[in-house]
Each structure stands twice: as structure tokens, then as C-alpha cells.
Amino acid sequence: MITIISNTDGAPYESYDNDNITNYGTEKDATITAINPITNVTVNGEHPVLISYNYTNATKTIEDKFETFDLKKAAGLKQGDSIKIKAYKNQSVITGLSPYGFPKEFIYLMPLPFLIIGTIFFLIALIPALRMFKLYKNGIVKEATIFSMMPQSGLPISNLGKGVIVNYYYFGATANKIFGSTTTPDFSILHEKRPDDTIKIFVSETDETKSCMVPMQLAIKNNWKV
């Protein structure tokens, strides 16, 4: 949608630098040639109006348009009326009326909430995955004892986080009992293992409190010697 909008050419007056025209433009007389409501834009039940006019620049007559939502001021204008404008570098604005243009910036910001939500979900999945990858690569293989397992439902629609929470304990370098937990997407463990059964885990080389269960399907597939 953004690509389409950014590549769609609007009317020339929509891209005018209104501040520069107002500050540096030369005041001229212009004649209104048409006033039409812009019916495809509605704000609080009202439409902006498009005022078409012409003016003379040197010996050349220039046709231009001006879009405004100053409906009270515009209501007193009609075709054939003389108005004051300011012209600058072949661009012009009507003096005393505020220009109106559809805020395309709003369109560009529309995907932002989706980007933020998507980034949050991405990080929820990525950060634990990076920690486990580090353990897969550098962890020390140890045995742990399961003390509980519990199925976990995922988030609505995406099912992100769906799996089995496996809680276990193992012993550290000083024979201290350390507890750990891993969420695995492999539901077969509920049928293959019971509390007090042993499983293989990876333990961090630098912090023995950090661990994760060895994913046996992945280990068999990649011929890990664990």
C-alpha cells in the first residue's frame, strides 16, 4: 500500500511548498473559474473544496487550484470573483485561506503498530532461540532428572510458544542441586518419559545454572554424539 501511494502522482498543487509561497511570494489578483467539493474526502460529514482560478504572470495566464477546509470563508466565494493570491516560482496559494491536503504521512505510519507487535513476537522467539543455540554449540552434556512435565498452549492464532514445559534438576560441580526448565515442541516426550526419568541436557561452560534439554530429534538427525 505504501509503495502504491508513494508512486502515485497527485495533483501539482498538493506538493506545493505553501510556507515558501506565503513568505516569499508576490501578491497578485486572480479570478475564480470554478469551486467544487471534493466528495471522496469527508471529515465530520463535510467535504473540503477545490477552488480553481487563473492569474496573469507577466504576459502569461496561469491556471491553478487550491484545496481548503476553510468552509466558512470559502462559502462567500463564487465563480468569477476576484481574489488575492501569492505566487512564487510558478506556484500559488490563495491569501487568507488555509490549504488542506490529505496527510500521506498518516498512511506511512499505519504499518507502525504491526511492526512493533511483530518485533515483540520476533524477539520473544529469537532471544530464547539464541540462548539455546549457544548451549547447543558450546554446552557440556550432562544428565538431568525430570520432576514434572506440563503441556503449554501457544498464543492465539500464531500458536507461538506451544509445546511441553519440562522441569528437571541436575547436579553442579560442587554436588549442588540445580533446577532447570525447557519448553520443547516435541509432544512425544509426554509418552516416552515420566517424572524421575533421566534426560540429556546441555549446560553452559561459564554458568552451570544455564541449561537446556538436548533436542533428541535434532540430535539424531544431525548425528550429535551425546
Image (tube, rainbow, N blue to C red):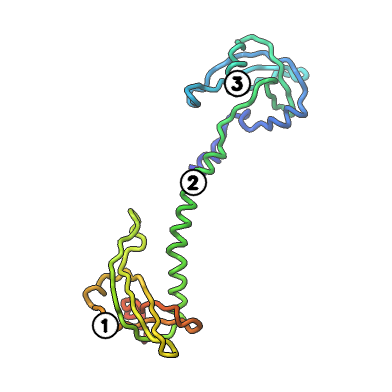
Spatial distance from mark 2 to mark 3, Cα to Cα? 31 Å
Viewer-side label of 2, 3: 3
In percent of width and height, residue 181 lies at 37, 74
Q: Residue at x 64, y 17 (%)?
A: 53
Q: Position of residue 141 (x, y in %)?
A: 39, 85
Label 3 to label 1: alpha-carbon separation: 77 Å
Residue 121: x and y in percent read: 43, 58
Amino acid identity at mark 1: Asp
Q: Earlier in the sequence, mark 3 or mark 1?
A: 3
Question: Camera-side residue: 186 or 65?
Answer: 186
Q: Amino acid at mark 3?
A: Asp
Residue carrying label 1? 197
Local SS, label 3: loop
Q: Residue at x 50, y 41 (%)?
A: 4
Disc nearer the start of the sequence (1/2): 2
Residue to which mark 3 is pinned: 70
Q: Quadrant of residue 165?
A: bottom left
- Residue 199 falls left or right of residue 122: left
Residue where numbered disc 2 is placed:
111
